[in-house]
Amino acid sequence: MLKILFITTHYRYGLLILTLLALSGWQWLQITQLGQHWQNVPQRALAAPLVDYAQQQAAVALNAQQRPRLQQIVDELVSAQLVATAQLYDNSGVLLAHSGEQNPYSRPYIRTLYSQSGSAEQEPIGFLRLQLNQTHITVTQRTVWQQLLYHLRWLLPLTLVGGLLVGYRLRARATL
């Protein structure tokens, strides 16, 4: 107990600096996780109704192994102006149907397709992957996120330097 008391009193400014570093790292991690979640919001909100519509048809076509029907489903999805690329895979990851062109700025929306059997435990039979076209919402969201990261890249180190200066100033006062 005495040893811990000695360490906390003797090295308290070092511990303060270490705590500031740990808090800065934790904050950066939280912002990164928030960014991943926030950037997927348009895909989840806009693609989910389309996938809900196509899910039953795709599951029936996958069970019956109707390749022309699978291609028709992805073509219908791409014909909606919202979807840039639609891909349908079987449960082992083999591409069965593809339509549209890849969009490098869009994050994919992937939905697992399950068998429509009446059993309680359903097994995956395939995957439907969509990429959305650029919309005003997605472009604005990406721009806002890039600006936020730009400001955080200089704000977090500035805060850390300010904390270090305060710590050294407190340490200098304590030695007087």
Image (cartoon, rainbow, N blue to C red):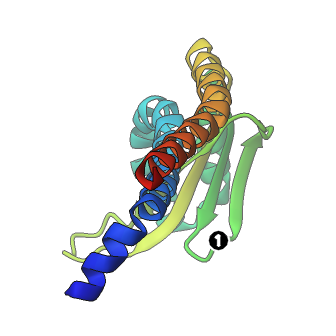
Q: Work out whether residue 57 can be spotted.
A: no
The amino acid type found where label 1 is placed reads: Gly
Write the residue at 47% across / 29% down: 46
Kind of element beneath mark 1: loop
28 up-or-down from 145: above or below: below
- What is the x, y in percent for residue 45? 42, 31
Q: Work out whether residue 119 can be spotted.
A: yes
Q: Quadrant of the N terminus?
A: bottom left
Write the residue at 60% across / 32% down: 152
For the residue pair 157 and 8, the one nearer the viewer reads as: 8
Most extreme residue toward the front, as rendered? 176
- What is the x, y in percent for residue 36? 53, 45
Q: Residues within 10 Å of mark 1 (few under 14, many from 20)?
A: few
- What is the x, y in percent for residue 15? 43, 64
Q: Is residue 157 left or right of residue 49?
A: right
Write the residue at 63% across / 42% down: 107
- Which residue corresponds to mark 1? 93
Q: Is residue 7 left or right of residue 146?
A: left
- What is the x, y in percent for residue 89? 62, 63
For the residue pair 95 and 67, the one nearer the viewer reads as: 95
For the residue pair 157 and 27, the one nearer the viewer reads as: 157
71 up-or-down from 90: above or below: above
Most extreme residue toward the top, as rendered? 136
141 up-or-down from 60: above or below: above
Q: Is residue 57 left or right of residue 105?
A: left
Give the tally of numbered discs: 1
The image quarter containing residue 156 is: top right
The image quarter containing residue 83 is: top right
For the residue pair 172 and 141, the one nearer the viewer reads as: 172
Write the residue at 32% across / 68% down: 9
